[in-house]
Amino acid sequence: MNPRSPYVHRPSSIHRLNPLTKGVLFLCTVVIAFATSSLTTVLALLGAVVAASAAARVARELARTVAKSAFVIVALIFIVQGLFYPGSRTPLYVVGPLTIWQEGLRFACFTASRLLAIIGATVLLMLTTRPEDLVSELMARGLSRKLGFVVLMTMQIIPNMQARAAAILDAQRSRGLETEGRLIQRFRAFLPLMGPLVVGSIISLETRSLAIEARGFSSPTKRVRIEDIPDTRWESLVRWGASLATFGFVVWRLVRWISSLIR
Amino acid sequence: MQATGIKGTAAKTTAAATARADGKSETVERAGSLDTAGIILEDVCYEYPGGVAALKGISLRISQNETVAIIGENGAGKTTLAKHLNGLLKPTSGRVFVDGVDTRGRTCAAMARLVGFVFQNPDDQLFQNQVFKEIAFGPRNLGYPADKVERLVKWAAGLVGIEGLLERHPFDLALAQRKLVAIASVVAMDTPYVILDEPTTGQDYPGTQKLATLVAKLHAAGKTVIAITHDMEFAAAHFARVIALAGGRVILDGTPNEVFSRPDELAMASVEPPQMARLGQRLGLEECVLDQEALLRALGLV
Amino acid sequence: MDIVVDSLTYTYPGQPGPALRDVSLEVRSGELCCLVGANGAGKSTLCCAVAGFVPHFYRGEMYGAVLVGGQDTVQSTIGELARRVGIVFQNPFDQITGATLTVFAEVAFGLENLGTPREETVARVEGALRRVGLWEVRDRSPFELSGGQQQRLAIASVLAMDPPVIVLDEATSQLDPSGTREVWQIVANLYESGKTLLVAEHKMEYVARHATKVVLMEGGRVVASGPPSEVLGRDDLEAHGVGRPPFMSVVRALREKGLWDGEVPLTLEGAAEVLRKVSGR
């Protein structure tokens, strides 16, 4: 297992879902979250994400990751919108020279929930789905072999690059390169650190392409996978249903928006 | 042959190398005495973040102008040990002194004046578009004037035997040649201590010969050379002292003759003695022989 | 399956001079042929030519021909060649595809690409992993293996596709002694099973012991080729950038002194035997 992937293996029905199903549901969540302007809808999405994470037994991991990545921005949203939301009329509290507005807080609630729903859905997908499985499933359904492979390789190579960056840092410090201290020093250290990383990656990429070519990568025959990821008619139904519902929702929002413009 | 030449002179300097696994107390005593020259390790333990103990109490002293080969299988702690000598790693417990300087108080970049360290993978350090500039990078970091930098670059390139490559682009060279460039770029810093991490890996016969010459010349220039190596022929022929590590501990420390005459301990370190020693052992020789002359003499064939 | 290289001259794109100059070579079916010589002698390029990467992958200018099993590599696609020639490179880490999560899936990768039926793939992957001694770690991530294990994984990945010809391009040069030993055990085992092997190698102790034929290269040319005793027994071997195994040098010294007039053995045990006879111990 890739030690740097956030994937957590748990025996749950969410984990067992076909990665494509999870991918589609994730996209639907994101699209609806962007399209809607109703706090209720956004809260419903957020609730669904939390419920799904509980079913997948990763609620704690989800909470931790979301809190870590979204805390600062959510706090900022509340401060900025609460104080400076344009067109605010109803003051809630007055603290010295600052006024907290009701409209601002309501908008902040909505924006923050929307953001949390989107981040939550993303984290949930990552926690319950190995990216390799998702890409491999997409490739089995017609995603180009080359494109799919580039995605897979990149996912694996980024963590490796992090490990190499550490080795390069050691090597250059051993040659007297100061990497700590003033900004100008750190700036000077940029090239000696980035250069080997880029060139080294290109060199290993060349070998890697040779190695995969030697394993019939360009072979015109259709790829046969050793293990199929299980898929059911029920899941396919969910995917189509969710996609159509999302599509319908977006169309409905558009119609409402356009008619409001005409009026 | 070059090899025997080095050993003749270097053997004298090993007299100072008394720090054995069993001589721990003696080393500790010495550290406190007036003589601070050389590298001194006092009961060094190191644990990687995550709790893997890589070094479990290493005490030894490496004197100035010694040539030391560190051997042992992968994971024995060789590179971890070497990274302590230039301050890249600081001991979890215990202390490391280089010429009296405690590494804990210095950044690695500051230690670079004293100890040069060549990494295993040259591609971790090469980044300039010309071999000359690459070799000049270290001396420039040490703040030497341009004329001195140029002199050092030519001197180092000469020692490593790559004078002919100075104008080339490092990445037009083969891996083994890039490795020689990386070695020259550290040698050019003209530090009293030079550490080589697996210098012979991937080298061909001429490359290995160049490295043997380098060790001899650095030794002749008064430097201390410490090499981590898997190549027992190289260790036996070109170094006056061999330290074998296993499981984060020093299990053997002495002259090549002493170390390679202990096949049982070497087996613990997954090390096979050099070919001549193996031949001697097969023929039931009592003493350890490391070169052809010694073998033939011991067999009464000279 | 045999390999025939016929007056091959090849220049990498953008390079001033050719990397291979008029190279001719024949490796018979079931032979274990070792390529020896200094870095830059052309060993890797020749390996790549046999696997078809020269000229299919690297392009460049090529004259002459390479035939594997009678078929011209230029006329074949890399995909077709993958079924005939398997190649293993120097750096074990760089050969991991990065597209798979387990050792098992990594070995299956090639067979999946070739569209092999599932049951057959599973059986062949198991066979290949058992052969290189990695069956026990089949569920681990390829990135968690040691260098020696990764190199054995690269060999298994190639073996699973069951090519009659296997090329190892300095496959042991980045490995420690035990990794080297493991790889050579597999090579010897493949030779026993009748594969045709082309192996570029710096560690002459193994070349002497295992090769049926040795090709000495220098500056892109073939300097000599023949049985190991002949090529490694050349007086000018070192001058061509190849070090003789010390145990062979000892026996040669005995010959010079007139103490031994038999063959120079190709193994350390053989050399010990000679020394025992000569010294009377």
Image (cartoon, helix red, strand yellow):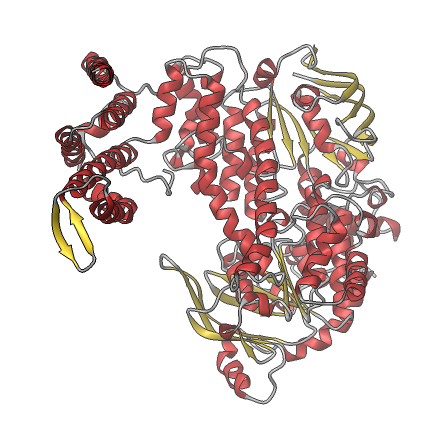
Q: Nearer the viewer, residue C198 or B173?
A: B173
Q: Is residue A215 left or right of residue C61?
A: left
Tell me the quarter of the picture where residue A59 sits.
Answer: top left
- Residue A95 percent across, percent down from the top left: 16, 58
**Which residue is located at x 16 percent, y 36 percent?**
A50
Tell me the quarter of the picture where residue C166 sits.
Answer: top right
Name the image quarter holding the C terminus of chain B: bottom right
Residue C54 seen from this side: yes
- Residue B270 percent across, percent down from the top left: 53, 54
Q: Nearer the viewer, residue C278 or C147?
A: C147
Query: Looking at the image, which residue sits at the far bottom?
Result: B34
Taking B62 as reference, is C13 above or below it?
above
- Residue B201 percent across, percent down from the top left: 65, 49
- Residue B121 percent across, percent down from the top left: 61, 49
**Which residue is located at x 48 percent, y 17 percent?**
C113
Q: Nearer the viewer, residue A139 or A32?
A: A32
Taking B41 as reference, is A40 above or below it?
above
**Which residue is located at x 38 percent, y 28 percent?**
A132
**Which residue is located at x 78 percent, y 63 percent?**
B146
Tell me the quarter of the picture where residue B49 sits.
Answer: bottom left
Residue B300 seen from this side: no
Q: Is residue C223 left or right of residue A235?
A: right
Q: Is residue A254 left or right of residue B155?
A: left
